[in-house]
Image (cartoon, grey):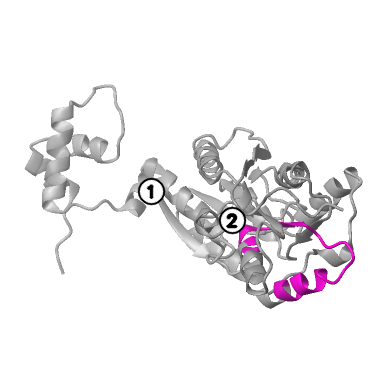
């Protein structure tokens, strides 16, 4: 086993004091400024010797480790994966490190992971999971004063502080885009999964406000697998006024709908316009490319990390419970003017 290089050895190699090395490696300013030449000499010596900092030893001195924990509900969810990547990139820009845990929608797994992160010298937590504000564990980490920020989550019982997209406005934008294209019979496909099931409520509100038909046969919020989408598309062709457009709760559902439609001879967008929600990477790569409501992932991630860092540095300060990020309509090829008006 290789002998671990000490800070004293780095100081000796750079011909400076241990205190100077400590200040440089820990990025601590003092009354006496350190020249760039000395900083370069110390860093070169540390790299040459293979010195590695011990974050846990540093934590005992500074009470901060520079490590943030993140738990996510589903690592296979394209949007969650996109957010996790952006969070990690932004954390690294801040010279911090990120540890990620995947709960796979399991509440007990989430609790265990949060407990581990809270107890193992993490400076703060990012929660990308549907944990209730009333959960005993959330109450416990609040009592411990452990800073945390939620991204999205269960809108009906959200943890605060939370950073979220204005999903109600996003659904309104999707419906209004289709209205502008002449569509009046608009269907909806969604899921009962936490985190997205409430989007159907926003859709209903908007359709009712516009006094448009709301047919239960063309609005389904319980899609669990792709075969259900194919059955749905076949069934809506048999009704007297089939939808000419569909709003989907997620891009993943929207892309599955496009695929199923093409398999049974429904042309997108000539026969049926499709709008998604999220703007995952595949949305622009699919054929036809997907019109969708973009969640500004970079802005959401940066806002969450900036807030968490502020909370870590100012634990006594009050912070807003909720910050809402504006969505954007991204128009691509899966929507077109309704040519089936009666």
Element class at badge 1? helix
**Residue 166, disc:** none
**In x, y percent, where is residue 10?**
13, 45
338 or 3: nearer the viewer = 338
- Residue at x 77%, y 72% (from the top left corner): 232
Left or right of 17, for residue 260: right
Element class at badge 2? strand
- Residue at x 75%, y 50% (from the top left corner): 338
Badge 1 or badge 2: first in the primary sequence = 1
**In x, y percent, where is residue 177?**
72, 43
Would you identify the image quadrant in which residue 182 lies? top right
* Residue 250 located within the stretch drawn in magenta: yes
Would you identify the image quadrant in which residue 21 lies? top left
Q: Which residues make up the magenta segment?
A: 229-254
Residue, disc 1: 59
Q: How many marks?
A: 2
Residue, disc 2: 128
**In x, y percent, where is residue 233?**
75, 70
């Amino acid at each position: 086993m290789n002998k671990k290089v000490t800070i004293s050895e780095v100081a000796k190699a750079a011909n400076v004091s241990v205190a100077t090395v400590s200040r440089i490696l820990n990025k601590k300013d003092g009354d006496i400024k350190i020249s760039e030449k000395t900083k370069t000499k110390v860093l070169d010596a540390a790299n040459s010797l293979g010195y590695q900092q011990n974050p846990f030893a540093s934590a005992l001195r500074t009470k901060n480790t520079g490590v943030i924990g993140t738990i996510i509900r589903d690592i296979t969810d394209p949007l969650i994966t996109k957010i996790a990547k952006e969070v990690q990139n932004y954390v690294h820009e801040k010279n911090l490190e990120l540890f990620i845990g995947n709960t796979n929608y399991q509440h007990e797994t989430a609790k265990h992971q949060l407990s581990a992160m809270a107890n193992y010298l993490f400076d703060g937590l990012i929660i990308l999971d549907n944990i209730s504000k009333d959960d005993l564990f959330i109450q416990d980490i609040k009592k411990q004063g452990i800073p945390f920020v939620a991204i999205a989550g269960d809108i009906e019982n959200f943890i605060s502080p939370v950073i979220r997209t204005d999903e109600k406005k996003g659904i309104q934008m999707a419906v209004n885009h289709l209205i502008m294209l002449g569509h009046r019979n608009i269907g909806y496909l969604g899921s009962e999964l936490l985190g997205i099931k409430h989007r159907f409520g926003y859709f209903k509100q908007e359709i009712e406000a516009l006094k448009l038909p709301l047919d239960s046969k063309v609005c389904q919020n319980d899609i669990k697998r792709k075969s259900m989408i194919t059955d749905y598309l076949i069934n809506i062709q048999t009704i007297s006024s089939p939808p000419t457009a569909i709003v989907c709760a997620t891009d993943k559902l929207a892309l599955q709908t496009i695929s199923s439609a093409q398999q049974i001879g429904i042309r997108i967008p000539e026969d049926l316009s499709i709008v998604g929600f999220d703007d995952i990477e595949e949305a622009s790569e699919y054929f036809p490319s997907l019109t969708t409501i973009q969640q500004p992932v970079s802005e959401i991630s940066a806002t969450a990390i900036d807030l968490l860092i502020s909370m870590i540095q100012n634990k006594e300060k009050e912070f807003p419970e909720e910050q809402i990020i504006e969505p954007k309509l991204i128009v691509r090829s899966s929507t077109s003017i309704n040519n089936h008006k009666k």
